[in-house]
Image (cartoon, rainbow, N blue to C red):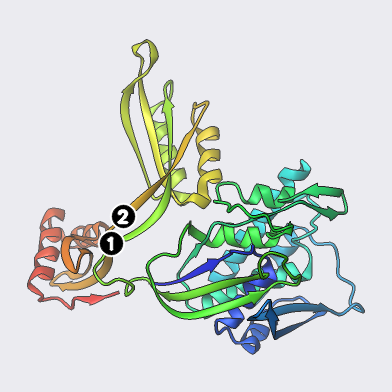
Amino acid sequence: MRIGYFDCFSGASGDMILAACLDAGLDLEALRADLAGMPLAGYTLDAKSVCKQGFNATRFDVRLDLTVVQPNRHLKHIREIINNSRLSADVGDKALSIFTRLAEAEAAVHGTTIEKIHFHEVGAVDAIVDIVGTCIAMHRLGIERVYCSPIPPGSGTVQCEHGLIPIPAPVAAVLLKGVPLAACEEEGELITPTGAAILSTLAQNYGPMPAMTIERVGIGAGQRDGKERPNIMRLMIGDMAGAVAGESESDEIIVLESNLDDISAEVVGYVYDRLFEAGALDVFTTPIYMKKNRPGTLLTVLAEPGLREIMEKILFTETTTFGVRCHHAHRRKLLRTIETVETEYGPVRIKVGRHNDQVVAASPEFEDCRKIASRSDKPLSEIMELALQTWRTGSGTGKGT
């Protein structure tokens, strides 16, 4: 699996993230061409090499044409720009997810709805370029999964149109819910709302750099100069599967728990579906006895740290719970690959788990077997056993996918 790890030891902003992608090999002309597919005018892009406290890095700038009047844009206008663009569906969907998350944070801070909010960040041309450009970069650089270090917010205060406010700024603070922060005495705003929106949406795990074979390193520079540390961020791109051959993968997840009573089984099933649709890794229930010996249900959710707010919202709005417990957990996983075998009834994918270069688990994909069983009028158990036996004997294709 090709992954990207953002090392935000000096914070992050939208232009720093995109600069790091350019420094890691994203072609500027290709970026220009992709962005030109949006109905958005009045800007030019510039990238150049700079030196930040002894470190060579790339700085990225969006230069506005002041003769072009830019309208105030709300979320619906951003949707129109993306929907009327020539961006790929994957890029467009990721960008809209980031814009929506940023809009929700703005609305929460200002006490209104996402459609009514008057944007300071989202509607600006440079924010549009930074967000859409980063999604383009993930696609062009082939990054399948994003990891991120803990983020230092900075310290002190920052001046905005509402006056002097503490760091992290209110919108950034909302966006950073559930994201591990790093202590930092550097004065100034190290994480901007746009940077927080991008990373908190795209990053699937936070923590130390995962085991990986590094292929590319990109360094993006910010606009200001740091006092205690250089104002740069690193992007490391590489292969996770080939990092430490045979060893298990590991990551950090969150475990959310709620004790439920006075709730029907049908509603619990509905909550399962909602949680999985929102990105939960696993959901399960355990029968328990609560105070006064009342029977109840312990609902447990496993999810990536960045999804904490979404998961809690579903639990609070869709169940009878008055509280959700949450803790971080370290998870070890078998290295997993998907191999396809050709049976006499059709292809079946086999999920294979390895530890220390040894196959310790193999399981046929249920949906593949179910479809074959339905059209062949064969028992499901027979199809599953046939697929597994074909894989074991090597009579199938055995091609990893």
- Camera-side residue of 229 and 202: 229
Instruction: Say which of 95 and 146 sits in front.
Output: 146
- For the point 64% across and 62% down, which residue is it? 11
Front in this rendered view, residue 273 or 310? 310
Marking on residue 248? 1
**Residue 332: which disc?**
2
Is residue 104 shown to the viewer in this render?
Answer: no
Residue drawn at 69 percent across, 61 percent down:
194
Q: Would residue 385 be found to the left or right of residue 188 on screen?
A: left
The percent position of residue 144, horizontal first and vertical second, equals 45, 70
Q: Secondary structure at mark 2?
A: strand
Answer with left or right where residue 127 lies relative to residue 118. Answer: left
- Please give left or right for residue 380 compared with residue 40 in the image: left
The amino acid at mark 1 is Ser
Label whose residue precedes the other's in the sequence (1 or 2): 1
The quadrant in which residue 375 appears is: bottom left
Q: Residue furthest top?
A: 292
Callouts 1 and 2 close, C-beta under 8 Å: yes
